Image (spheres, helix red, strand yellow):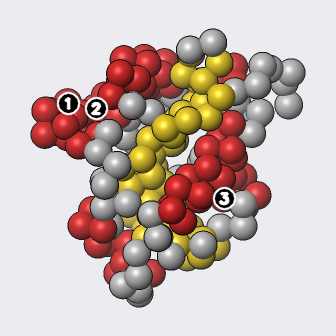
Amino acid sequence: MNDLPEQIYRELIPTDLPALLDLDAIVQAELKERKHQYFIKQYLSEYKAKELEHLFDRKRHIILGAFHNNSLNGTLRLTVNQDELGKFHKILGTDHKLGYLGHGMVRSEYRGNDIMTRLVARAMDEAGTEECASLVTLVRPDNKPGLGVATKLWFDYIKQIQVAKRPAFVFSKEL
């Protein structure tokens, strides 16, 4: 672990969109060899204003961030809208309320400092507040940090699936 300043963890609000897009661009440039990664800016450009309107809608998504000196250094999105999670209900064989963790990213200079672990822990609390019975996430086999967080926080491996013609592991955790 590096000796980095303490982060402030909070939910993002619409005025944080420029910082979110900046972080997204930085991480996308750092991980250009991982072209299968689906980044927020790409996501928003495909859905235009429709998705932008819903990005900070707490009934659909809760976006959490790690900040230091007003700089967004890590983020994670918790999706709680059940209409968007149908495929995971089928994979898990359940109809109880789920939360989906996705679009997690941390600036390279802040990686290895438990920022994502703390964001996931905060998302677990938020999912409980939203009455989710469990969380589900996808982790690519080559995403060692993501696999580490899933293991560290006792997520259960469910199965491997194909997403965008690439393998992904499905993990779940009962709350």
Q: Residues within 10 Å of mark 3 (few under 14, many from 20)?
A: many
Q: Give the residue number, with chain letter if any, for mark 3.
A: 150
> In the figure, residue 57 lies in which quadrant?
top left
Amino acid on which the number 2 mark rests in the picture: Gln
Q: Secondary structure at mark 2?
A: helix
Amino acid on which the number 3 mark rests in the picture: Ala
Q: Are marks 3 and 2 in contact (CB under 8 Å)?
A: no
Residue 159, above or below 153: below
Relative image position of residue 75 (x, y in whole percent): 52, 35
Amino acid on which the number 1 mark rests in the picture: Ser
Q: Are marks 2 and 1 in contact (CB under 8 Å)?
A: yes
**Residue found at x 77% / y 33%:** 113
**Residue found at x 29% / y 40%:** 55
Residue 159 visible from this viewpoint: no
Q: Give the residue number, with chain letter if any, for mark 1.
A: 45
Relative image position of residue 150 (x, y in whole percent): 66, 58
Residue 68 visible from this viewpoint: yes
Along the line of sight, which residue is nearer the eye, 30 or 50?
A: 50
Relative image position of residue 164 (x, y in whole percent): 32, 53
User: What is the quadrant of the C terminus in the image?
Assistant: bottom right
Along the line of sight, which residue is nearer the eye, 94 or 148?
A: 94
